[in-house]
Image (cartoon, rainbow, N blue to C red):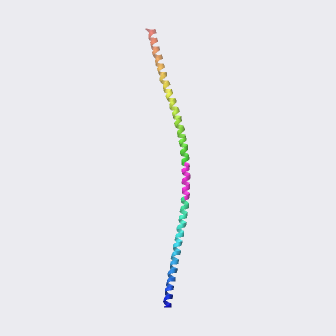
Amino acid sequence: MVEADLERAEERAESGESKIVELEEELRVVGNNLKSLEVSEEKANKREEEYKNQIKNLNNRLKEAEVRAEFAERAVQKLQKEVDRLEDELVQEKEKYKYICDDLDQTFTELVG
């Protein structure tokens, strides 16, 4: 009976040692996975920071472009007003020219006729 108890104790010890080796291997794998995940997290954090900087730069460029566009729109409006004014002035000058031509034609006709 003592021999049977000893045998069972040795089997349990072997089983325990085997389980220890198995758990140590699993711990090593988990440790390696953890290191890999930490490296991945560090890279992801770096990319995130780069993206944040890129977004900030793009937002700044967008604001600058909006300001330039607004300025350009105001300049276009001013130029359009000037074009409209000049077109009106041209129409008036053409009317004056026509009136003068008609007056000259009438005067010439009176002088000749």
Which residue is painted at 55% across and 41% down in the image?
A: 67
Which residue is painted at 55% across and 60% down in the image?
A: 43
On screen, 61 above or below 82?
below
Which residue is painted at 54% across and 50% down in the image?
A: 55
- Give percent across and percent down for residue 19: 50, 78
On screen, 5 above or below 24?
below
- Give percent across and percent down for residue 36: 53, 65
Tell whether position 46 is magenta.
yes
On screen, 53 above or below 38?
above
Q: Quadrant of the C terminus?
A: top left
- Give percent across and percent down for residue 34: 54, 67
- Give percent across and percent down for residue 29: 52, 71
- Residue 38: quarter of image: bottom right
Q: Main secondary structure of the magenta part?
A: helix
Which residue is painted at 48% across and 25% down in the image?
A: 88
State which region is magenta.
45-57
Instruction: Report the number of numbered marks.
Output: 0
Q: Nearer the viewer, residue 54 or 108?
A: 54
Tell whether position 92 is magenta.
no
